[in-house]
Image (cartoon, coloured by chain):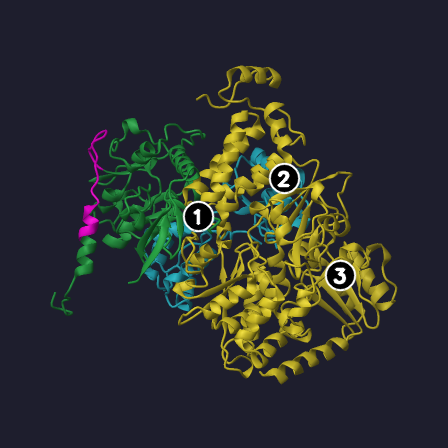
Amino acid sequence: MAARPTAKRSPRRDDGGEHPSGDPRFKLIDRTLKRFQYQQDALIEVLHTAQEAFGFLEEDLLIYVARQLKLPLSWVYGVATFYHFFSLKPQGEHTCIVCMGTACYVKRAAEIVASLQAEFGVEPGQTTPDGKLSVATARCLGSCGLAPVIVVDGEVLGRETPETTLSRLKALLDTSQPEPMAG
Amino acid sequence: MNRADLENMAQREQERQQGFRCRLLCCASTPCLSSGGTAVADALQDEIARRELNAEVQVVSTGCMGPCSRGPVVTVQRQGEPDLLYENVTPDAARRIVQQHVQGGEPVQEHLLPLDIPFFTKQHKVVLSNSGLIDPERLEDYVARGGYSALAFALREMTPEEVCAEIIRSGLRGRGGAGYPTGLKWDLVRKAPGARKFVVANGDEGDPGAYMDRTLMESDPHRVLEGMAIAGYAVGAEQGYIYVRGEYPIAAKRLERAIRAAERRGLLGSRILDSNFNFRIDVRIGAGAFVCGEETALMASIMGRRGQPVPRPPYPAQRGLWGMPTLINNVETLGNVAPIITHGADWFAGIGTEKSKGTKIFALAGKVATTGLIEVPMGITLREIVFDIGGGIPDGGTFKAAQTGGPSGGCIPAQFLDTPVDYESLRALGSIMGSGGLIVMDDRSCMVDVAKFFMEFCMDESCGKCVPCRVGTVEMYELLRRITDGSATPADLATLEELCVMVQETSLCGLGQSAPNPVLSTLRYFRDEYEAHIRERRCPAGVCSLDQVPVLEWPDRLHAQALAGNGSISGEVN
Amino acid sequence: MSVVTLTVNDELVSAQEGQSLLSLLEELGIQIPTLCHLEGLSERGGCRLCLVEVEGSNRLLASCVTPVQEGMVVRTHSDRLLKYRRMILELLFAERNHVCAVCVMNGHCELQDQAVNLGMDHVRYPYLNPDLPVDASHERFVLDHNRCILCTRCVRVCDEIEGAHVWDVMGRGVNSRIIADLNQPWGTSQSCTSCGKCVQVCPTGALTTRGVTVAEMEKQHDFLRWILDGRNKKQWHYPAGEQ
């Protein structure tokens, strides 16, 4: 569901493309730019595409988008940081999103967050130093009937407890070579 | 495509469906999928293939059927027999259903969910009438159940004025929370001068604990599109935007597909149903900002800007997207439009109460036996919702409060369980209808903690434009935090109360104006809990830790320290 | 332009249609506190100090963004309004580290003036004491986030008057911050023309000239009127290519 794409940065290749780096992922951005006829109103759509392609919005990417749409840099940066969906930092290999909607909160989702903090030493919004796991909280994933809900690598899991979450994540991190693709 | 083609399509699809001896409807909405719905659907398909029943049995992936906590759910429609619903279906149970029920005609008793329980009988499905019965990814399924006939009727038989008049007469009010009469809004936009006009469907459902809009968009996307097209015809708009919350990728994908399918058949786009009416719809994806549910912030976001509200007036009906008159309706509101046109305003006005017509969808969650999505007639009592439909409080708990309206709403205590659910009654109790989140709390929920939870939400979601909301929410949260950790003084409570009223009255937009509601409503009905935290250093529900000591009150502080018994002084010293 | 009549603090007054309530009140000599408003810039309606009571409206209205209307009944200085204005100032003082005693704008600061005028002499809310940086990378100016009240006058003057749009706001809520370009040190901004307009319109000590010491900084807004009057008056245009 709300999982942020966790694409790792692939090595840059030199096979053409409109961006001087030749990174083919810029073509995806160019396609969106063309679809919206380089309208400045399309900034959020373009940022969505950019984040999907690159996993996060690095500075170079923001500059590229700003130049293409002829928008001031601070404008683009302001929009990118206003919305929680956009990330300016690389995400971990795996993501665990804990829903903190009302139903999940009433059913003690905060204890799951606390257990993650204790086990992995990361606060919501942070990534472990080894880059393996990003922990985030979400404001309602709309699966309130299954509260508390977590999303691990895009897979929605319901009726979690701190114990089940921890064992699930430990198993995932232990076997994370190669990365299993879930849901 | 014209009207006759539409009727043909409906007839062909109905005949196709009748060609199957048995239809198995599998709920493929998020809650059921995350309880293992995919494996169940696979098992059904597999078993049917194994028994070579493909020609006579159809498996359909549908939208939400309602009882989410009992998922995965499967409906069995056998020709000539009433529908039967199975709950908690496992792949094993799925195979047995095929073998025993589909082939043998004997229902599998242990997974059967009776359809005559109050959960179903107390509901009245208008907006969700197709949800759970059709494949949301097939236009034909929607058309077979009368889809797009309301649009066809409106285009051929009604003038835009008449459409607006019909909606006004129906008494439909905005389902996003505030309850403004929908027809009046349409008429304002229709009359507003402007070279172009826009229709916006607000699907930025941000209330934690609410998922009505998501379910509607995922389970019956064409219903929303048809409502938008009728609205476009009524107000004179040729372009619509449907703004979907970024957290709902499935809803966005289904809407995109539905738009393309409808455009291919001439139900959207140019010269719709061979009329002179053109209407295009584009999907816009939000990026995680609750404030974008506020209509001026939503428009800013559609135009690619920071989602900050602007002062009203001018209202969007006068100056909206790109300065043009813009109609903004919640998707649930738009979901009511086609039924009203089809069945007439009188039929719709016959449901509900004097001032609140029709039905309301609630996402029932929290400490209640059966959680899920329900659609009930306005005027139903909270007691019926919680105890009849929801089946009461599980694990021997007692009902304490129902929270409606999310971070903009309030908590309704047990003594008001018999209040009818409508816009005015809820407002009189200090809560609001809101978009439809309904969270049940039992005696193990601390109301101060709940208020703090909502305030933290508002603090995170404040856009930062106006001072009362930007700083006020943080200060209110800070005071609530003090109350729950034991470091508050009685003076803090007075400061909190005064601040709540100020933020309510001085904030720029609805987010700030309603952010204090959860605090004010819990103060109104559960002041004793606040007092217990501060004066007795006790959390009646046993949720708060109260491990800090008050600041700035030396005698009390030493006393409290002795009470706390840990000897350590914490909290800042000013 | 037609004239409308309305009642302000029990007195019947006339105003021009389309005029903002705030400009009318200023003409009448009624002192309304403002912070984000600055004549010549677009209105924001964010600081909420200029709120007034209008009969028939259940909400308080920001006079800077409310046009006058025929028959309007307005109150500008009720006890409730005075209390709320003081509370809003308290919130501003609690939000960031406004320590007047060591501020270069001490004595000339609009925030400080409003506090004095409204009699706000102490803050009852917890100080948030955020840990905010000072950007002294620009060769002529300094940006001190501790003094910033997010009125966005600098953002608007840079966009609307200078046309460079160096400034914008990043983040949201209480974590909002004024940024130059891609949230980089001001001195490294390539779009900044070092014109100093943002410094002159800043109501507090957030934007100041480099090298001034406590209470030395004073600001001039007059340039705004000169520029705008000139732009409005401009009676001829060079044909393309002749300029």
Measured from the top left, where is residue B437 in percent x and y?
Answer: 63, 50
Q: Quadrant of residue B435?
A: bottom right
Q: Which residue carries the number 3 mark?
A: B74
Residue C43 in view, yes or no: no
Measured from the top left, where is residue C162 in percent x and y?
Answer: 23, 53
Label 2 and label 1: CA atoms lie apart by 43 Å
Residue in the picture at 23% in, 41% down: C138
Q: Mark 3 — on which chain does it sit?
A: B
Q: Colour of chain C?
A: green
Which residues fall within the magenta stretch?
A: C209-226
Residue most toward the left?
C242
Q: Which residue carries the number 1 mark?
A: B508
Q: Secondary structure at mark 3?
A: strand
Q: Colour of chain B?
A: yellow
The amino acid type found where label 1 is placed reads Leu
> For residue A166, which numbered disc appears in the image?
2
- Seen from the viewer's position, the closer of residues A29 and B524 is B524
Which of discs 2 and 1 lies nearer the camera? The answer is 1
Magenta span: helix, strand or loop, mainly? loop
Mark 1 crowd level (few <14, some 14–19, many ≥20, 10 Å Cα): many
Label 2 and label 3: CA atoms lie apart by 32 Å
Q: Mark 2 — on which chain does it sit?
A: A
Which of discs 2 and 3 lies nearer the camera? The answer is 3
Left or right: where B518 falls relative to B278: right
- Relative height, residue B154 to residue A25 (above, below): below
- Label 3 in the same subunit as label 1: yes
Q: Is residue B414 magenta?
A: no
Q: Quadrant of residue B536?
A: top right
Q: Which chain is cyan?
A: A
Which quarter of the rendering shows the N terminus of chain C? bottom left
Q: Are marks 3 and 1 in contact (CB under 8 Å)?
A: no
Mark 2 crowd level (few <14, some 14–19, many ≥20, 10 Å Cα): some
